[in-house]
Image: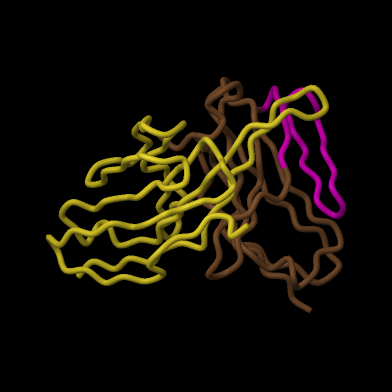
Chain colours: A brown, B yellow
Amino acid sequence: QQQVKQSPQSLIVQKGGISIINCAYENTAFDYFPWYQQFPGKGPALLIAIRPDVSEKKEGRFTISFNKSAKQFSLHIMDSQPGDSATYFCAASIYGGSNYKLTFGKGTLLTVNP
Amino acid sequence: NAGVTQTPKFQVLKTGQSMTLQCAQDMNHEYMSWYRQDPGMGLRLIHYSVGAGITDQGEVPNGYNVSRSTTEDFPLRLLSAAPSQTSVYFCASSYSHRGMGQTYNEQFFGPGTRLTVL
């Protein structure tokens, strides 16, 4: 049972465009939703995270939108740059002591063309 | 700080061989985890530890053993390697911290070990 479904698998965007990656989760106990960015040959690194008490969180060009009723959350990358080309993973965990046990989506390979 | 380090970077094994993937962190993090990454599968949790002497199974634990004798080290042992264990393995460490009235957890990943089992 895949608890976190991520789409699309791959995404090609022109420089300056908006990249949007979507995730949906099934377990209503999940209440911590991070996004990780991974460059080729490197380990994933935390990009931005949200908890469901807010509907949106913005850090620079990166924004998470969260829809608790629909059990969906998405990552928006504004003014996408070639340096943003990487694999992005959404994840979810249960807060309050066990939020080190992340359940990951399958990843989205983002390519930003110059 | 070196962060999370993993050795070796690459390894080729024959079916049935055993080996240990090393992971160390110098951030005094209480939590450590092992994930495997396969194409199109994302990252899947193998084993995790909430502190020295305490380990538990994740989503895909079969064929792997772990131990945590110190805060710093969390080795992953493959008892009898199988081709299905060909993967990239990531170790991660994490801590909980409070900010803005909330508790957060961030996992720091190592650079990975690429394992091929023939």
Residue farthest toward the bottom in the current orientation of the protein: A114
Quadrant where the image shows the C terminus of chain A? bottom right
Between B85 and B97, the one lying in front of the other is B97
Which residue is located at x 33 percent, y 41 percent?
B60
Q: Residue furthest front?
A: B70
Judge left or right: residue B113 versus residue A111.
left
B25 left or right of B116 in image: right
Q: Quadrant of residue A69?
A: top right
Occupied quadrant, residue A17:
bottom right
Farthest-out residue, left: B16
Q: x and y percent of residue B58 in the render?
A: 38, 36
Quarter of the figure with residue B89 = bottom left
Q: Residue B80's spot in the image, x, y percent?
A: 15, 54
Percent position (x, y) of residue A52? 72, 26
Residue A48 belongs to the span the image colors magenta:
no
Residue shown at 64%/41% (left/top)? B106
- The front one of B55 and B71 is B71
Using the image, determine if residue A109 lies above or below residue A53: below
- Specify whether residue A51 is painted magenta: yes
Number of marks drawn: 0
Q: Which residues are magenta?
A: A49-70
Report whether B72 appears left or right of B53: right
Q: Nearer the viewer, residue B53 or A49?
A: B53
The quadrant of the rendering that contains the N terminus of chain A is top left
Position of A61 with respect to B91 (left or right) is right
Which residue is located at x 68 percent, y 68 percent?
Answer: A85
In the displayed structure, B56 sits above or below B90; it is: above
Residue occupying the point 37% across, 37% down = B59
Position of residue B32 measured from the top left corner of the image (x, y, whole percent)? 47, 41
Q: Is residue B30 above or below residue B85?
A: above
